[in-house]
Amino acid sequence: MKVLLNGFIYVLIRFAFLGLSLLPYLVSRTLCRVFARCIWAMDSKHRRIGMLNLSFAFPDSPPSWHADVLRRSFYQLGNLAAEVARLPRMRREEVISKVTYE
């Protein structure tokens, strides 16, 4: 049963990414940001885990800093989803213009 559920979730995510890839980038990014904010608001379990991990990694930083970093990390996942959805349709030159490395 769990394999079937995982398969269904996978197909659902693939269709969502296909839909995002067909939208203009700014619309796609906005939708993903809104979705990330909804997940942030609803997913108390992972907020607790993230806060605990940040408190271990940065014990001298105040809890307000941990919360801000964690919230921005969730929001960044929304931006990442919009970028990943567009990746298969991007031209090589467009990808190269967005990638930086040191």
Image (tube, rainbow, N blue to C red):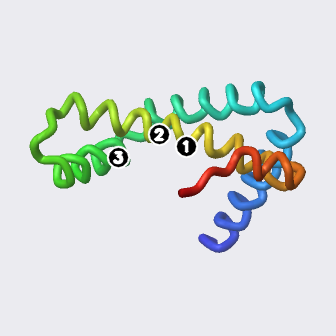
Disc 3 and disc 1 in contact, CB within 8 angstroms: no
Q: Which residue is mark 1?
A: 77
Q: Amino acid at mark 1?
A: Leu
Give 8 or 60, whichever is nearer the viewer.
Answer: 60
> Looking at the picture, does residue 25 appear above or below residue 46?
above
Q: Nearer the viewer, residue 58 or 35?
A: 58
CA distance separating discs 2 and 1: 5 Å
Which residue is pictured at 78% across the width and 51% down the height? 95
For the residue marked with disc 2, what is the amino acid? Answer: Phe
Crowd tier of the residue under label 3, counting other residues whose Cα lies within 10 Å: few below 14, some 14–19, many 20 or above = few
Image point (66%, 45%), residue name = 81
Q: Residue furthest front?
A: 102
Residue 50 % position (x, y): 31, 48
Task: Check disc 2 and report the residue beneath it.
Answer: 74
Q: Is residue 95 above or below residue 32?
A: below
The circle on residue 45 is: 3
- Seen at 60% across and 70% down, the residue is 2
The local secondary structure at tag 3 comes to helix
Q: Work out whether residue 30 or residue 37 is closer to the camera in this orientation and state it.
A: 30
Picture quadrant where residue 20 is located: top right
Q: In what quadrant of the picture does the N terminus appear?
A: bottom right
- Looking at the rendered structure, the kind of residue marked 3 is Lys
